[in-house]
Each structure stands twice: as C-alpha cells, then as structure tokens.
C-alpha cells in the first residue's frame, strides 16, 4: 500500500495510495462507484452513510469558521443552472478550456499540462501525442421543452459567479460596508479530461468558496491574510502541518487579471498537489458583469464620497478533495507486540463520521436491552452507532477502520454496577465510568482528542 517515495521531503509516516483508500471507502460505506450496478460512471461517486456524515462535518466546520464565527462574511445559495449570460460574461464559455491531446499509440486522451515527461500514462509511449486542442470543460444542458440552441444552458463549473452576480443584492439588503465576504457551498460540474484519481478529481464535485470584497489598495494584504487563515483551518482539522504548504504562483502562471494567486498544497501519496486555491481576482469579475449586463456594480464609500469597484480575494476548496486528504492523512496500519495489524483512521473527532460506538459485549438477551438504553441516552448528544454483530475484538477493529474516536462497551458487570468501559481509538486505553456520568466523560474524552483550534486572526486593518 505504501510508496517508496513516501519518505521524501522528510515526511516519515507512510501514506495509503488511492486504491487502498477507495477500497476502504467502498467496504465501509464512505463512497461507492456511482451506479455500480451498471458498471459505474467515469469519475463519479455516490457517497454512502459514513461518507455523508463526514462530508456534513467538513461543510459545517468550514461554514462555522468562514461565516458564523466571523462578523464580515454572509452566506448565499445560488442556482446551479442559471442564465447562460453569466458564463459568457465570466469568460467560461470562451476560455474555460484544458489542453487535450490524444496518444497516437493507444488513442488515450489526456490533459497535456498533467503529463509527466510527455509520457502516456496509459501505454508508456513517449512524445507520441497529437497537437493540443482546447477542450471546453463546461457541461451543457437544455432548459425548456425545445432542444435547440436558444435553450442551451450550463451546469455551473464553480460557485463563485453566483456571488458576483448577487454582489449588489447582498450588499444592499444586508447594508454591508467594505470589506465583506459572501460564502457559498454547493455542487459544481466540469467535464474533466484527467480521470481515475478517486475523489481527488471528479466531474461532479462540491465546492466551498468565499468572495471577499475589499478596497483595491487592501487586496494584497487580504490575500496574505486569507492564505494564512485557510491554512489554520486545515490545521484545526488535525492535518499534519508538515504535509501542508503554501505555493505562491509565479508571475507567468497568473491569470492576466490576477494580482496574486496561491495554492494551498497537501503532500498526497503521489507528491505535493493542490487542495485549495486562494486567488486575488482584482476587479475582473465585477467589471465583466457590469459591462455585460449594463448595470453598475460599484460600491459607494460614504467616507470618501466615491464610487469604487471593489477588489476580490477568493479562497476556493472542494469538499471531496478535503475528504480524500483527511482520509489519506488519517490512515495508518499499526502492528502490535503480538504481530497483529490494525487499520486505523486517526480522524479528528469533529470530522469522524461516528463519534461514539455502543457495543454490548455479546448479543446476550440481558446485555442488549441495557446497551440499547445507553444508546438512547447518547444519541441526542453524539453521532453514534450501535453494533452487536460478531466478536468484540472485530467490532473494535471495524470502528478503528472508520475512525470512531470512542467506543462504549456494555458487559455483564454493567448489570450490577451500572458502569461501562470507554475505549479510546488511538491509545486503545480503557477506563470504567458510571452510566450517570457517561455523557460528561465522553465529552471530556472528545475534547482531549480534538486538535487545538486557533481562532481566526483579526482584520489586518483597523475598523
Ligand atoms: P485543477 O488545476 O487541479 O484542475 P483548478 O485550479 O482549476 O484545479 P479551482 O478552479 O481553483 O481548481 O477550484 C478550487 C478548488 O475546487 C480546488 O482546489 C479543488 O479543491 C476543488 N476542485 C476543482 N476541480 C475539482 C474536481 N474536478 N474534483 C474535485 N474537486 C475539484
């Protein structure tokens, strides 16, 4: 499962590859190949019960930190299929393309900028490609009953444009002064050429994006602020800091309108790659929509009495990619003194799909009702799971493999002393606690396993 290159860059712990993770994800109900019944569907996944819980946790954590805990960001949910004029104005219809090449040897199709040493990832042929053609990644659909060109619409390839076209609505209705941000979480669609990377790159994916509108002269400072702030969020999820870095784009990589763009990168099993983009987009988008719509998209500054076009800093990240990164970062295979191996996900409690598993020692008819009563007590307080199938050892292993931080075991002594055993996932340490104090004890144990969360830094500018 591990890669010889894992020791590179001084990162010692071995990492699971995509095959190991996708097989665990399928076996344990995180993610299934979409419509597997029909042979699947390229680069598309259906999320199972545990995956769904984990994704909600990721979204909630992002939303709390980016919106609810801040005073300067508000939320939005825009339509996925909207007026195609939006995508003409944003440039997506014309230039949202990747360079597509065909391998002359095996006819495989690839993204030219993702080839290594101009070698075909499929057949290994070197330098045997057609010239690159621009391939537009927009997914087209038809709206209304007539399938003609007039009815063409697009599935959004990013959530960001929803914020730009609603800039004025939000600013006016919420009476916002600069700087302020608009955040959105939702599905996006791209007809990606490069496939086969599990949930790292899929054709339907979910984004968490925020457009932060500010005075032009403050843009670069806010760009610096947001890179650091986003990095702090990843650390708060328990991601190993040595596997995170910021890569500032070089001048030649920048889009013509961008003053600065940075990727937050994670060291995946295959090497450093993007997890999030933090882009300084200048006034490009608001100006483009103002020109195309003929409406004024400016900000009136009451202090200086001037109308300005705000500049924008955009942190944009994918739920699916964060999920993959967390699984990869948390995955471990540990061998004990007796040579027995367990697979364990060391997930931070706030992202783990299940927080507490309730396990009666056996399916004994006296234990089961007691365990179920304890489960009833815990359900309002934690994400729980009840499991009484197979031996207790196998059930611990199952919970370890899905990253459950704590197990509560109900045994025959419980019937006499009304106490249960709490087992901690990482240390496997066990402690006995009375049922009357169980919720409290579990809360304490969860807190002890939660990474320290640094609060967002204050604004770099005085109010
Ligand atoms: P790439 O160059 O890898 O295709 P990008 O730079 O075009 O990606 P952005 O448009 O900046 O990506 O999207 C912001 C974030 O959205 C990415 O950092 C990633 O987390 C997520 N994302 C983008 N495309 C996909 C995809 N096809 N599948 C899953 N997540 C994606």
Image (tube, helix red, strand yellow):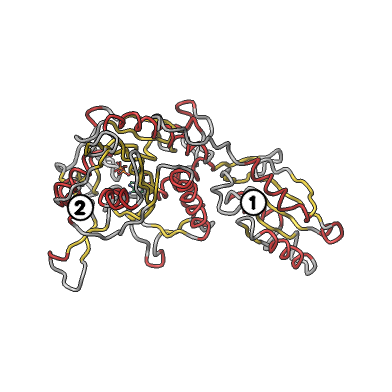
Image spot of residue 31 (x, y percent)? 46, 56
Image spot of residue 93 (x, y percent)? 17, 51
Q: Secondary structure at mark 1?
A: helix
Q: Is mark 1 within 8 Å of ligand 1?
A: no
Note whether 169 is above or below 252 in the view shown: below
Residue marked by disc 1: 397
- Whole-angstrom CA distance, mark 1 to mark 2, is 49 Å
Position of 112 with respect to 12 (left or right) is left
Which image quadrant: the C terminus? top left
Q: Residues within 10 Å of mark 2 (few under 14, many from 20)?
A: many
Outermost residue on the bottom side: it is 145
Outermost residue on the right side: it is 416
Q: Residues within 10 Å of mark 1 (few under 14, many from 20)?
A: some
- In contact (CB < 8 Å): disc 1 and disc 2: no
Please tell me in which quadrant of the rendered image residue 144 appears. bottom left
Q: Residue at x 39, y 35 (%)?
A: 226
Q: Secondary structure at mark 2?
A: helix
Say which of 264 and 69 sits in front. 69
Q: Earlier in the sequence, mark 1 or mark 2?
A: 2
Q: Which mark is residue 87?
A: 2
Ligand 1 shown in quarter: top left
Position of 136 with respect to 209 (left or right) is left
Note whether 340 is above or below 39 in the view shown: above
Q: Is residue 110 visible?
A: yes
Image spot of residue 413 (x, y percent)? 84, 57
Q: Is residue 102 visible?
A: no
Q: Residue at x 27, y 55 (%)?
A: 156
Q: Which mark is residue 450?
A: none
Image spot of residue 329 (x, y percent)? 51, 40
Say which of 109 and 395 sits in front. 395
Position of 18 with respect to 138 (left or right) is right
Please state which of the two labelled residues, at mark 1 or mark 2, is closer to the viewer: 2
């Amino acid at each position: 499962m591990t890669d010889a290159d894992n020791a590179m860059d001084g990162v010692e712990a071995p990492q699971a590859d995509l095959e190991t993770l996708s097989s665990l994800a399928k076996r344990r109900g995180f993610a299934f190949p979409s419509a597997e019944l029909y042979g699947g569907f390229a680069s598309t996944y259906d999320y199972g019960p545990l995956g769904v819980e984990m994704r909600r946790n990721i979204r909630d954590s992002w939303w709390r930190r980016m919106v609810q805990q801040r005073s300067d960001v508000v939320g939005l949910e825009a339509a996925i299929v909207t007026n195609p004029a939006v995508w003409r104005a944003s440039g997506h219809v014309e230039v949202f393309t990747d360079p597509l090449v065909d391998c002359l040897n095996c006819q495989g199709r690839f993204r030219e900028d993702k080839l290594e040493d101009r070698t075909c990832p499929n057949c290994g042929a070197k330098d045997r490609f057609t010239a690159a053609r621009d391939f537009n990644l927009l997914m087209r659909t038809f709206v209304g009953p007539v399938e003609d060109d007039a009815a063409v619409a697009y599935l959004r390839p990013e959530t960001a444009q929803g914020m730009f076209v609603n800039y004025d609505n939000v600013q006016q209705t919420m009476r916002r002064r600069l700087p302020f941000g608009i955040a959105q979480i939702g599905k996006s669609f791209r007809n990606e050429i490069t496939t086969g990377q599990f949930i790292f790159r899929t054709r339907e994916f979910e984004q968490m994006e925020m457009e932060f509108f500010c005075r032009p002269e403050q843009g670069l400072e806010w760009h610096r602020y947001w890179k650091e702030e986003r990095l702090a969020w990843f650390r708060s999820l328990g991601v190993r800091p040595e596997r995170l870095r910021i890569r500032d784009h070089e001048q030649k990589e920048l889009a013509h309108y961008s003053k600065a763009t940075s990727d937050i990168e994670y060291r995946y099993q295959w090497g450093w790659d993007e997890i999030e983009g933090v882009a300084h987009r200048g006034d490009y988008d608001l100006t483009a929509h103002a020109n195309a719509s003929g409406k004024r998209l400016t900000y009136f500054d009451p202090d200086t009495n001037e109308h300005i076009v705000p500049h924008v800093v955009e942190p944009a990240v994918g739920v699916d990619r964060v999920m993959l990164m967390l699984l990869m970062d948390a995955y471990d295979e540990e061998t004990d003194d007796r040579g027995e191996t367990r697979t364990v996900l060391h997930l931070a409690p706030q992202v783990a799909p299940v927080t507490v598993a309730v396990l009666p020692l056996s399916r004994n008819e006296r234990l089961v009702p007691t365990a179920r009563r304890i489960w009833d007590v815990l359900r309002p307080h934690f994400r729980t799971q009840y499991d009484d199938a197979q031996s207790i050892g196998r059930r611990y292993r199952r919970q370890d493999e899905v990253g459950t931080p704590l197990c509560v075991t109900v045994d025959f002594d419980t019937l006499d002393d009304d106490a249960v055993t709490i087992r901690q996932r990482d240390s496997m340490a066990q402690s006995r606690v009375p049922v009357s104090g169980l919720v409290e004890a579990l809360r304490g144990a969860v807190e002890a396993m939660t990474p320290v969360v640094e609060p967002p830094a204050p604004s770099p500018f005085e109010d």
